[in-house]
Image: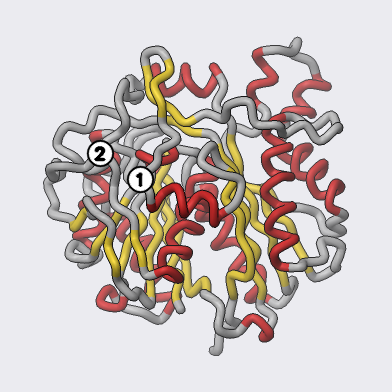
């Protein structure tokens, strides 16, 4: 059976490092990081960026709108086309309203991700019901895979995939309870890693199955799994993430030998990095160069998979892959090839991985 090609036609990365993908990538190549010290932890927060669009939208929704607007303009996409679908990815959405508003049925409805998705859809005139993906920290990658699958069915021709999260005291307290926050810039896969940094951000990827985009980067395949190990602790073996990786390769019609770079989840927590390294080894990808961008952006939760995929796609186009900030000495049992400096390679196919609470795992393959 011949699969429909799915092309990446436009994108936006909206973070404390910049309002466009180009601005973000330029700052990353200069080794600039948005991660700063905030009290007892390091994180990447927006400063006094003017996001007020004159509506009653929250900061979370304004981030979604700002990111989508730039991507739609780039791609000259008509949101009101009946063959276009909006997919929204987030882990926490407007949960911060619980800190400032009195709990009530009205507040519960306002906090619902479906409410935010409908507000954003109405802002741009999307006519189809938006799809919401909220599956912990794999949400962004799963949203891309969901879009790919919807376009393959022929139900839609264009998918606007957007993800965002903002960091509230609610989110901070949760990660503090796990003692997972680092007081320094995080060190993915490093022997001295001691926890993650959180970050705020948004990103949009527009996908299309229209043949006029032939020649663009493609979403070649994706895989999703759940290890059912623990509500917050990942699998100790990495077998389930390896399963998602292998499913993504099979879906793409590729083998491990075809992958030339990996954009890892790389949170810099003890257990996640160990599990991810095991999965990469089980997938026979241990020699493939990889990076984690968490030292630049922090962990942006529902936006992470999108931000890191888009930056990796730009790396493919530029032939310039970024290092892993904070990495000095390998500190995982399974050997993996962590980039510690910028790498100039012409990659045809790259892999993006993600894992999250509840044992969820996802992997997606992009190719030329």
Q: Determine which residue is flagged by label 1.
A: 31
In percent of the image, x 55 and y 27: which residue is there? 167
In percent of the image, x 81 and y 54: which residue is there? 129
Q: Is residue 237 visible?
A: yes
Q: Residue 325: x and y, percent? A: 29, 42
Q: Is residue 134 visible?
A: no
Q: Within the image, what quadrant is residue 202 found in?
A: top right
Q: Is residue 359 above or below residue 306?
A: above
| CB atoms of marks 2 and 1 within 8 Å | no
Rounded to the nearest angstrom, the CA distance separating label 2 from label 1 is 11 Å
Instruction: Find numbered disc 2 in the image and state the secondary structure of the residue it sits on.
Output: loop
Q: Is residue 127 above or below residue 56?
A: below
In this rendered view, identify the residue nearer to me: 276 or 9: 9
Number of marks in the rendered image: 2
In this rendered view, identify the residue nearer to me: 55 or 158: 55
Instruction: Find numbered disc 1 in the image and state the secondary structure of the residue it sits on.
Output: loop
Q: Within the image, what quadrant is residue 259 found in?
A: bottom left
In percent of the image, x 81 and y 61: which residue is there? 79
Q: Residue 23: x and y, percent? A: 54, 51
Q: Residues within 10 Å of mark 1 (few under 14, many from 20)?
A: some
Q: Is residue 214 above or below residue 86?
A: below
Q: In which quadrant is the N terminus drawn?
A: bottom right
Q: Residue 287: x and y, percent? A: 17, 65
In the rendered structure, which disc, 2 or 1, sits on the residue that comes first in sequence?
A: 1
In percent of the image, x 60 and y 41: which residue is there? 164
Q: Residue 37: x and y, percent? A: 39, 21
Q: Which mark is nearer the camera, 2 or 1?
A: 1
Q: Which mark is residue 66?
A: none
Q: Determine which residue is flagged by label 2.
A: 326
Residue 35 placement, left or right of 191: right
């Amino acid at each position: 059976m011949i699969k429909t090609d799915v092309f990446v036609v436009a994108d936006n990365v909206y973070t404390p490092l910049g309002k466009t993908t180009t601005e973000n990538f330029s700052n990353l190549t200069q080794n600039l990081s948005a991660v700063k010290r905030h009290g007892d932890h390091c994180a990447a927060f927006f400063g006094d960026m003017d996001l007020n669009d004159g509506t009653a939208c929250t900061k979370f929704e304004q981030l979604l709108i700002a990111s989508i607007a730039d991507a739609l303009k780039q791609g000259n996409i008509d949101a009101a086309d009946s063959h276009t679908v909006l997919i929204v990815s987030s882990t926490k959405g407007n949960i911060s309203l619980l800190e400032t508003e009195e709990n009530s049925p009205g507040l519960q409805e306002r906090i619902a991700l479906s409410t935010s998705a409908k507000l954003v859809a109405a802002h741009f005139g999307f006519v189809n019901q938006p799809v919401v993906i909220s599956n912990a920290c794999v949400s962004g990658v799963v949203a891309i895979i969901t879009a790919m699958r919807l376009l393959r069915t022929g139900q839609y021709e264009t998918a606007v995939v957007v993800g965002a999260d903002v960091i509230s005291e609610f989110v901070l307290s949760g990660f503090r309870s796990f003692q997972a926050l680092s007081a320094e810039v995080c060190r993915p896969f490093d022997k001295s890693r001691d926890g993650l940094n959180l970050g705020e951000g948004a990103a949009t990827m527009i996908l299309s199955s229209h043949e006029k985009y032939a020649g663009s980067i493609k979403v070649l395949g994706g895989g999703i799994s759940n290890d059912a190990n623990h509500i917050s602790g990942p699998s100790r073996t990495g077998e389930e993430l390896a399963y998602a990786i292998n499913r993504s390769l099979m879906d793409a019609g590729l083998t491990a030998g075809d992958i030339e770079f990996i954009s890892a989840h790389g949170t810099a927590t003890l257990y996640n990095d160990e599990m991810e390294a095991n999965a990469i080894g089980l997938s026979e990808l241990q020699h493939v160069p990889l990076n984690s961008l968490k030292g630049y952006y922090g962990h942006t939760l529902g936006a992470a998979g999108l931000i890191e995929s888009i930056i990796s796609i730009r790396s493919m186009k530029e032939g310039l892959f970024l290092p892993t900030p904070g990495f000095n000495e390998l500190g995982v049992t399974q050997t993996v090839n962590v980039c510690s400096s910028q790498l100039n390679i012409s990659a045809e196919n790259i892999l993006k991985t993600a894992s999250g609470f509840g044992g969820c795992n996802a992997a997606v393959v992009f190719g030329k």
